Image (tube, rainbow, N blue to C red):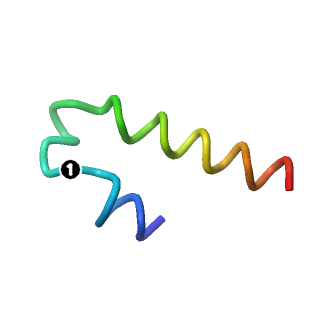
Amino acid sequence: SKEFNSDTVPPSASTSPDPRPDSFVLHYDNMLRN
């Protein structure tokens, strides 16, 4: 959770919620598969 909030998510995440869900979903999907 921290890595997404500090690294992957830019300050404009509030206005552009696109990069956050994508990365989170991909990461979460990986965790589920592994």
The quarter holding residue 31 reads: bottom right
Q: Residue at x 38, y 41 (%)?
A: 20
> Which quadrant holds residue 4?
bottom left
What amino acid is found at the position of numbered circle 1 in the picture?
Pro
| Residue 22 rendering spot, x and y as whole percentages | 48, 34
Q: Is 25 on the left or on the right of 17, as rendered? A: right
* Residue pictured at 48% horizontal, 64% vertical: 1
Q: Residue 25's x, y, as percent? A: 58, 39
Looking at the image, residue 4 sits to the left or right of residue 31; the answer is: left
Q: Position of residue 28 (x, y in %)?
A: 66, 49
Can you say which quadrant of the picture contains the C terminus? bottom right
The crowding category of the residue bearing disc 1, from other C-alpha atoms within 10 Å (few below 14, some 14 to 19, many at least 20), is some
Q: Position of residue 30 (x, y in %)?
A: 73, 49
Q: Residue at x 52, y 46 (%)?
A: 24
Q: Quadrant of residue 16?
A: top left
The residue indicated by pointer 1 is 10
Does dot 1 land on a helix, a strand or a loop? Answer: loop
